[in-house]
Amino acid sequence: MTKTKMKSAPASAGGRRAVKRLPKSRYTRDEIEEIFRRLSLQRPEPRGELEHVNPYTLLVAVVLSAQATDAGVNRATRPLFAIADTPEKMLALGEEGVRDHIRTIGLFRNKARNVILLSEALIKNHHGKVPANRDALTALPGVGRKTANVVLNMAFGEPTMAVDTHIFRIANRIGLAPGKTVDDVEQNLLRTVPEHYLLHAHHWLILHGRYVCKARKPDCEACVIADLCKFKGKTCDIPAPIVPVG
């Protein structure tokens, strides 16, 4: 998951996030329902593209994916997870061993250190298990809110919204759930996306942004919601046929 710097909403003096009025979606409820109906038909069983074998390896993979591509992370983690798929095995491998496996990934030294530290914390505080709790996850070294949301969604089936660069771009570009910060977009999407689509919504939006509504040049002709889209720069008003993607 390639990551760029996006601002988070500031906390108040008491540590609580200030309640703020978020921009409204540019779409009606019926239009939003239709957007996600089509995305769900196109990808009935959406999956994240980071390879993993259990909640622990998912957590590690997401931590490694910051400022890196999923493909690059997968190339590094295949041999790593073959020998270290638990916190205990990762500690036995050691920081130098982790570093040797992930040196093709950006910021590999800091990431190797965090993988060892979070493994230690899991053993010490959670009996070697990945906790199904956002606060416990974000207390782990190298784990932020987005990483926690990915793990909660993919490993534990919680309807979270992990906002990455693709989701942040789409939410603002097409006016689905505008926001100036990652937190704003997350909260706006959580209130905008119909509840029955929320479990898979972040995957649908990520994959749509990665393969269709691309950063430099959106492929509007391949877009199944082209007729509904309110992006001023779109080049097509005719929706692409809905062809299920595995």
Image (spheres, rainbow, N blue to C red):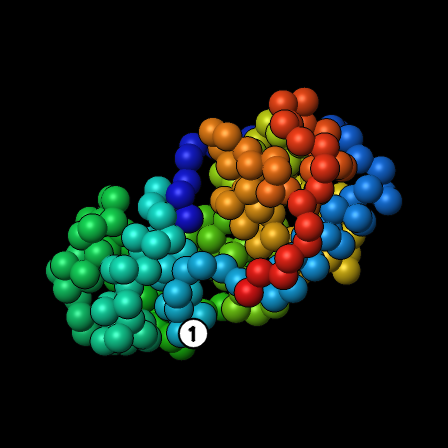
Q: Is residue 175 visible?
A: no
At 51% from the left edge and 36% from the top edge, which residue is drawn?
214
Residue 48: % across, % down = 49, 59
Residue 134: % across, % down = 54, 58
Q: Which residue is mark 1?
A: 54
Q: Is residue 116 visible?
A: yes
Q: Quadrant of the C terminus?
A: bottom right
Q: Is residue 240 left or right of residue 89?
A: right
At 61% from the left edge and 38% from the top edge, which residue is drawn?
221
Q: Amino acid at mark 1?
A: Asn
At 76% from the left edge and 37% from the top edge, which residue is drawn?
228
Residue nearer the viewer, 4 or 173:
173
Crowd around label 1: few <14 · some 14–19 · many ≥20 (10 Å) = few
At 36% from the left edge and 61% from the top edge, which residue is drawn?
60
Residue 202: % across, % down = 60, 51
Quarter of the image where one finds residue 25 = top right
Residue nearer the viewer, 28 or 157:
28
Quarter of the image where one finds residue 113 = bottom left
Q: How many marks?
A: 1
Q: Is residue 67 left or right of residue 132?
A: left
Residue nearer the viewer, 212 or 121:
212
The local secondary structure at tag 1 comes to: loop
Q: Kindly give the residue lying farthest to the top in the view shown.
A: 232
Residue 50: % across, % down = 41, 60
Residue nearer the viewer, 203 or 100:
203
